Amino acid sequence: MKAPKFEESFTQLALLNQPQRQQVLAALHPAAGLDRVVALIGEIRSKGRCCPDCGCERCHRHGQANDLQRFRCCACGRTFNDLTGTPLARLRHKGKWLDYLETVLDSRTVRSAAKRVGVHPNTTFRWRHRFLGRVKDDRPERLVGIVEADETFLLESQKGSRKLDRKPRKRGGRAALRGISHHLDCILVARDRSGQTIDAVTGRGALKVSQLVTHLLPKLDPQALLLTDANAAYPAFARAHGIAHQAVNLSAGERVRNGAKGAIHVQNVNAYHRRFKEWLMRFHGVASRWLSNYLGWHWALDGGRVTSVEQLLRIAFGVINR
């Protein structure tokens, strides 16, 4: 629209009644959402923008496509945009992304989010795991001081799988074997007294020393004091790697005892288990293959760590908050 015609139309906006103003706002909302998300993508990717093929940082503008600026690499000649090579590449309806991220902050289910945003439930499910794919990497580099560690278990789920490696069961259900078995997913959570937390889906069945070496050792400060329950894997792990360790015997009724560096207990990490399981109940069961994404989602929301859609979008691009 040419400027004189726009100015003429703009002056008539004051004459609109309330239903007409609402109609205009509804028509402009998707375009405004698109402009905002395109601006945020450009801001996030402007620092460190490089060719996804050869890694060269020298590029020049090369037209536009699908509402995004395209670039051409000065070294290899490949063209790309700011979504190329990211989990968000080839996703559509960019104007609705920020509205969808609001539903992520509200922990809405797939169907509830689809209704709120105005897209198909399959789309919101696809978006959920594209946007959350890198949230699980947003973790502290080190746990220091007094570190509590404990594992919890969820019934394994092959929800959504076309082929099962067992007989199907009704949603929910129970493990076929009593106690800790290969029918349960093991989730390891370690948390220091400042609230920094790491977690990992270690596999199915009981926790093993090798899994502690893989998931806990790289994140544990050498001077940390490790507090656990009486699981035999923890003292074996601590002895093998020279880590100070104290255990509480929960099965014998021991909950807290005094130590030289402070109270010896695992109540903080157990409270985190409880909050995660209560939060997870709204989704009526999640597939084991996506469990690490849900752990990352809960960690982002727990304690108000992530409070804006801009923060979530940055994490989706791999811009990790430290």
Image (spheres, rainbow, N blue to C red):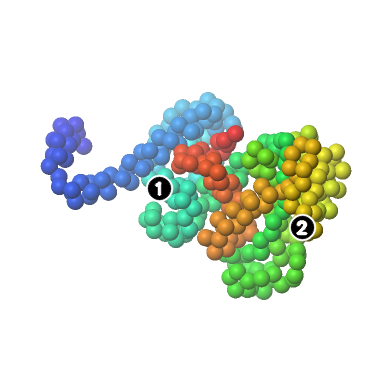
* Residue 80 located left or right of residue 33: right
Numbered circles on residues, count: 2
Residue type for callout 2: Gly
**Disc 1 versus disc 2: nearer the observer:** 2
Local packing at callout 1 (Cα closer than 10 Å; few below 14, some 14-19, many 20+) is some
* Residue sticking out furthest to the front: 258
Q: Position of residue 166 (x, y in %)?
A: 69, 71
Which residue, given by chain and number where applicable, does mark 1 sit on?
99
Quarter occupied by the C terminus? top right
Does 276 appear above or below 217? below
Query: Helix, strand or loop at disc 1?
Result: helix
Q: Position of residue 134 (x, y in %)?
A: 58, 44
Disc assigned to residue 60: none
**In the rendered image, is residue 77 in sight?**
no
Residue at 45 percent across and 36 percent down: it is 41
* Residue 7 located left or right of residue 25: left
Q: Earlier in the sequence, mark 1 or mark 2?
A: 1
Residue at 84 percent across and 48 percent down: it is 235
Quarter occupied by the N terminus? top left
Local packing at callout 2 (Cα closer than 10 Å; few below 14, some 14-19, many 20+) is few
Residue type for callout 1: Asp
**In the rendered image, is residue 55 in sight?**
yes
Residues tagged 1 and 2 counted as in contact (Cβ below 8 A): no
Residue at 53 percent across and 25 percent down: it is 58
Which residue, given by chain and number where applicable, does mark 2 sit on?
253
